[in-house]
Image (tube, rainbow, N blue to C red):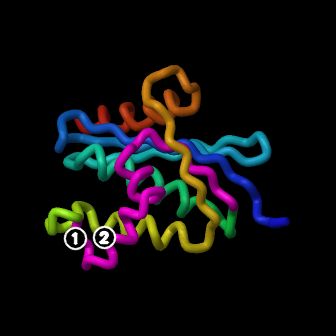
Amino acid sequence: MSDKPEITVFTDGACSGNPGPGGWGAILIWNGNEKELSGGEKHTTNNRMEMQAVIEALKALKKPCKVAIHSDSALIINAMTKGWIENWQKKGWRKADKKPVENKELWEQMLAAMKPHEVRWVKVKAHVGIELNERVDQLAVAESKKFN
């Protein structure tokens, strides 16, 4: 049995235009307590904001944890659960079509942030009324609007 705290995390990113002003949001839940995190950038992409949300949520954890990350980003979920990220690394951060992987530095930050933790990835459908997913979306959109 693991003595690591079990944390539930919901993350989302948003962008007004792609690229354009963007925001990210994360909610961390432990023992019935919630912590909201959010931020944004003046000129970014939706994928970058989705990734930033995961990175910032993981970096906020003060000790090794068992983390269930809920995301509606097919890119992140597929990269982490279908072996894409391992294949990109083996191929020198190139995709199957030989093109460079976009946002390599963020993927590397995400992998580094994951290192101390046991991470489980949970695919969430966007905009179907899942309360915590709707809330992280609202955080991300609100952050993106700060740049308008």
Q: If the image is split into quadrants, where does the C terminus sit? A: top left
SS at badge 1: loop
Q: Position of residue 60 (x, y in %)?
A: 57, 59
**64 in relation to 132, above or below:** below
Q: Residues in magenta?
A: 66-95
Label total for image: 2
Q: Position of residue 88 (x, y in %)?
A: 30, 70
Q: Give the residue at x 34% y 46%.
A: 40
**Left/right of residue 112 with respect to residue 105 in the rendered view:** right
In the picture, the disc for residue 94 is 1
Q: Quadrant of residue 14?
A: top left
Mark 1 packing: few (<14 Cα in 10 Å), some, or many (20+)?
some
Pointer 2 residue: 88
- Tags 1 and 2 in contact by the CB under 8 Å rule? yes
Q: Where is residue 125 in the image (x, y as percent from the top left)?
A: 47, 31
Q: Give the residue at x 38% y 32%.
A: 142
Q: Give the residue at x 26% y 73%.
A: 93
**23 in relation to 92, above or below:** above
